[in-house]
Image (cartoon, rainbow, N blue to C red):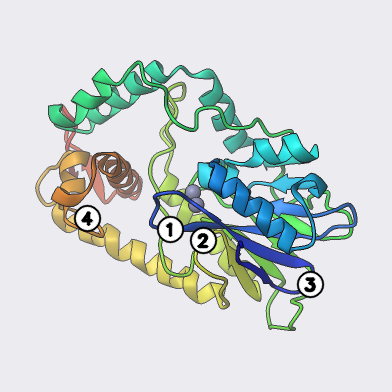
Amino acid sequence: MTATFDHGGGVRSLRVPIPDNPLGFTLVYVVDTDRGPVLVDTGWDDPASMDALVDGLTACDTAVSEVHGVVITHHHPDHHGLSGKVREVSGAWVAMHAADASIVRRARETRAERWYTYMAAKLAAAGAPEEHLAPLRSARRRTLPGLSPALPDREIVPGELLELPGRRLRAIWTPGHTPGHVCLHLEEEHPAGLPGHGRLFSGDHLLPEISPHIGLYEDPDDTTVTDPLGDYLDSLERVGRLAPAEVLPAHQHPFTDAPSRVRELLTHHEMRLTGLLTLLATPLTPWQLAERMEWNRPWERIPYGSRTIAVSEAESHLRRLVKLGRAEAVAGSDPVTYVAA
Ligand SMILES: [Zn+2]
Ligand SMILES: [Zn+2]
């Protein structure tokens, strides 16, 4: 039986497992409305995960067929994976921020081959060694997983209340982890009277014990130089100022005192940026920087796919340092190297 939890005030959660992932599960929230339950995120698209969602909703005295709407914090497959199946069974609407909706649209339209070519070129430019690029070059005919996510049918507009009959749920745009990540602020008073302003469904933006991955916003059709880490840090301050009584994240467990968690994360990133500047005393490619950064295990033990993610994270930190004038690209270097300014 799926573990469910009653958070009070017409909000429950259930754990939808993520196969082969150390995070373990996505917390899917069930918000009662006058028109039926509305889900915040749906979970990974896998038969066992769907079974867990079905079981969990039954334990909440409802059913997938009763779902009125689906609110998605961001497009990642552990959040949006089952949205299409839920909509098929229930006829529910699916809502997402426009920036993530366009990623979904692009993923559906882009052929796998184009992605591999794009990623191989990007990684080569970041200084990835040939043995890392070879699998990308030879994998072109395989299809990518998660390439047919459901197109949302409603847009989540920052600052506006969602159409949830009988509830006050406001969208807070929190770009960084993805360009269209949103937190959802349930403005009603906390059911147990905890001090603060309502409750915040925080998706992956604000988690109690881990800091979310901040990479580059990958888009083969867009060459805009974005600053996802800068976006993330700004978004953190935005939710800190909301001072919700309780945070209901998409992984791990609910927690209170959002402002102090925000301060911890801001300090963590400031220390990390300062640490990188020490490494950048000598010019390094993003790949070389990633090799020297601190991860949850030594670089030699980081698997192939995670190295790609790590390099993307190194690049988002470099973008931030360059934008702050604390590092610069070395003129004429190829692949490009960066050095502390
Ligand atoms: Zn995510
Ligand atoms: Zn997630």
Earlier residue among tags 4 and 1: 1
Can residue 333 be seen from the camera position used here? no
Q: Is residue 22 above or below residue 320?
A: below
Q: x and y percent of residue 129 in the render? A: 14, 31
Question: In front: 275, or 108?
Answer: 108
Earlier residue among tags 4 and 2: 2
| Residue occupying image coordinates x 23% and y 26% | 135
* SS class, disc 3: loop
Earlier residue among tags 1 and 2: 1
Q: CA distance from mark 4 to mark 1?
A: 27 Å
Which mark lies nearer to you, 3 or 1?
1
Mark 2 residue CB less than 8 A from any atom of ligand 2: yes
* SS class, disc 1: loop
Question: In front: 84, or 197?
Answer: 84
Label 3, on which residue?
Answer: 9
Q: Is residue 256 above or below residue 310?
A: below
Mark 1 residue CB less than 8 A from any atom of ligand 2: yes
Q: x and y percent of residue 81 in the render? A: 57, 40
Label 1, on which residue?
Answer: 23
- Label 2: few (<14), some or many (≥20) within 10 Å? many
Label 4, on which residue?
Answer: 276
Label 2, on which residue?
Answer: 251
